[in-house]
Image (tube, rainbow, N blue to C red):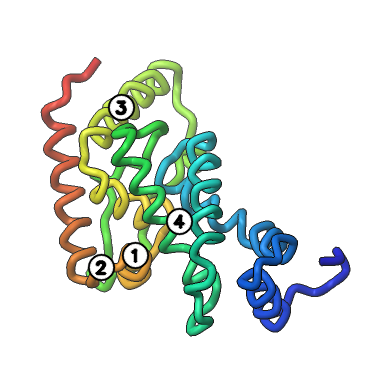
Amino acid sequence: MDDATEYTPELERELIRRAQAGDEEAFGTLMRTHYEPVFRLVHSILRDEHSARDVCQEVWITIWRNLATFRGDAKFSTWVHPIATRRAIDHLRRRNRWFSRFLPFATAVDDEDGGDRVPAAPEAREEGDPRSDLEKIERDARFDRAIAALPPKHRAVLALREVQGLSYDEIARQLGLARGTVMSRLFHARRLLAQKLEKLPCD
């Protein structure tokens, strides 16, 4: 596709049609267009750039192999994102690790209607003195260990909720679950996380 060509829904449908017929160049255009949103989704679950890049490769291979099943009933991105979410969760199950700092979920408060209240990002908080910074590093390390001990299905809903800020309905669509199941998993994830934090020693 020429750089000057406007990427429209009509063009996307044509690219999908051509890719389904085996046109690798058309598929490459689709992949370049949707790569970054897919990467951000995977990265929000894995919290590790290198792992997220690896998983994205798996995601696009899966999409290529299953592209013939896409019927166009929904947007292409709506079809792609659950594939990416499942691959990221599979990766968590295989590795059973959590690589980066999470926001302090134990202090997060959700609106009853599933609003998007998320704790402030670390960079938005005031910088403290060296002693406070050290305490924060130690506290973050405790969160790392506590989150690493959670089952993958709980880590997934935490990532989609707290990092991406998705609503319960959006998470339900991403994971193929009922809204009530999402709410239940999120509740239990936070409860488990709080319990694990209580049991972990302060270094």
Mark count:
4
Reading the image, the residue beneath label 3 is: 139
Q: Nearer the viewer, residue 167 or 7?
A: 7
Q: Is residue 26 left or right of residue 37?
A: right
| Quadrant of the rendered image containing residue 31 | bottom right
Where is residue 30 drawn, in percent x and y? 66, 64
Q: Residues within 10 Å of mark 4 (few under 14, many from 20)?
A: many
The span from disc 3 to disc 4 (Cα, nearest Å) is 31 Å
> Which amino acid type is marked by label 3?
Arg
Reading the image, the residue beneath label 1 is 171
Describe the element under mark 4 as helix, strand or loop.
Answer: helix
* Circles 1, 2 touching at the beta carbon (< 8 Å): yes
Which of the numbered marks, if any, corresponds to residue 84? 4
| Closer mark to the observer between disc 1 and disc 2 | 2
Foreground label between 3 and 4:
4
Marked residue nearer the N-terminal end (3 or 4): 4
**Where is residue 58 shown, x and y percent of the image?**
50, 48
Query: Of discs 4 and 1, which sits in the foreground?
Result: 4
- Which amino acid lies under the numbered mark 4 shown in the image of this protein? Ala
- The quarter of the picture where the C terminus appears is top left
